[in-house]
Image (spheres, grey):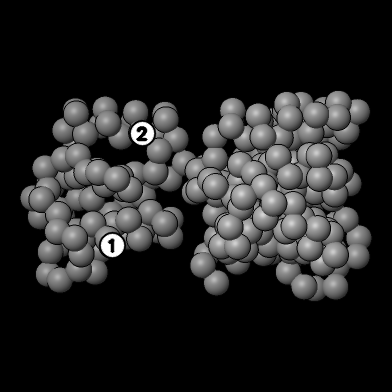
């Protein structure tokens, strides 16, 4: 690997940027493929660039099946993240499931009595207001956002940021009636029908979940389903 390629790759990883390293298996020439640009020795056509970016999206390294050119793509994605708004009972089992599934987890709740180290050991906690917290954290296409407070004063500001972000998943706890009120408020705030339809609500797969742990399982299952494009 050329020094300049290694430097760019390390910088991308330090900056938590998604990047794919495309290598020519015969010549050893390499190019870094980002979502918005390329850097390196190979002159890649649109078919190969699309395949490399699809590999990034699918988080899957391997041979590129594009004609006879012997190419291998190695994916370097930033960690998956889950931002949970609301340090409520459901959040505790959801944190465990998310961490087991390879997510970095951030709990956002300005109510200090809820977001405590005793209840959420080893988890990044933010007591900022949800919209400020999401802006500070930064939301990319490897981020899932789940609002659990049932309080419009906390959930809505988070949704205002989430719906116009690159988050691959946005979900909100609440009944169909609760969500209908949420839709009315978001519409009044200027959000389009397409933007509002991004919200998975009631949150989670319909498995008749009752307990906090069961609801957490349904949420984690739905996030996994969306992540893999099903």
Q: x and y percent of residue 51 in the render?
A: 28, 62
Identity of the residue drawn at 69% across and 30% down: 124
Residue 141 shows in this picture = yes
Label 1: state its secondary structure. Answer: helix
Q: Quadrant of the N terminus?
A: top left
**On the image, which quarter does residue 117 sit in?**
top right
Seen from the viewer's position, the closer of residues 176 and 219 is 176
Identity of the residue drawn at 12% across and 48% down: 42
**Circle 2 crowding by C-alpha within 10 Å: few under 14, some 14–19, many from 20:** some
Q: CA distance from mark 2 to mark 1?
A: 20 Å
User: Is residue 21 placed above or below 14 in the rendered structure?
Assistant: below
User: Is residue 224 placed above or below 38 in the rendered structure?
Assistant: below
Q: How many marks?
A: 2
User: Which residue carries the number 1 mark?
Assistant: 51
User: Is residue 80 placed above or below 124 in the rendered structure?
Assistant: below
**On the image, which quarter does residue 215 sit in?**
bottom right
Q: x and y percent of residue 12 in the render?
A: 36, 33
Label 2: state its secondary structure. Answer: helix
Label 1 near label 2: C-beta < 8 Å?
A: no
State the mark number for residue 12: 2
**Circle 1 crowding by C-alpha within 10 Å: few under 14, some 14–19, many from 20:** some
Comes first in the chain, label 2 or label 1: 2
Seen from the viewer's position, the closer of residues 203 and 122 is 203
Relative placement, left or right, of 28 versus 228 is left
Relative placement, left or right, of 80 versus 73 is right
State the mark number for residue 94: none
**On the image, which quarter does residue 37 sit in?**
top left
Q: x and y percent of residue 158 in the render?
A: 69, 41
Q: Quadrant of the C terminus?
A: bottom right
Identity of the residue drawn at 42% across and 30% down: 15
Relative placement, left or right, of 73 versus 187 is left
Residue 61 shows in this picture = no
């Amino acid at each position: 690997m050329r020094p300049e390629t290694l430097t760019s790759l390390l910088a991308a990883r330090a900056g938590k940027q998604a990047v794919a390293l495309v290598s020519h298996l015969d010549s050893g020439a390499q190019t870094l493929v980002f979502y918005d640009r390329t850097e390196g020795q190979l002159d890649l056509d649109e078919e190969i660039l699309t395949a490399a970016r699809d590999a990034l999206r699918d988080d899957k390294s391997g041979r590129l099946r594009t004609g006879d050119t012997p190419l291998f793509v190695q994916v370097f994605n930033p960690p998956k993240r889950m931002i949970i708004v609301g340090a409520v009972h459901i959040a505790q089992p959801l944190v465990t499931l998310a961490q087991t599934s390879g997510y970095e987890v951030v709990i956002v709740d300005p109510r200090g009595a809820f977001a405590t180290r005793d209840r959420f050991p080893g988890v990044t906690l933010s007591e900022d207001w949800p919209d400020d917290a999401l802006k500070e954290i930064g939301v990319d296409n490897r981020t899932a956002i789940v609002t659990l407070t049932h309080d419009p004063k906390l959930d809505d500001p988070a949704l205002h940021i989430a719906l116009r972000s690159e988050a691959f998943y946005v979900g909100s706890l609440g009944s169909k009636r609760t969500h209908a009120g949420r839709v009315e408020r978001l519409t009044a705030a200027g959000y389009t029908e397409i933007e509002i339809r991004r919200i998975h609500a009631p949150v989670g797969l319909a498995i008749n979940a009752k307990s906090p742990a069961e609801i957490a399982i349904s949420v984690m299952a739905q996030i996994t389903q969306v992540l893999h494009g099903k």
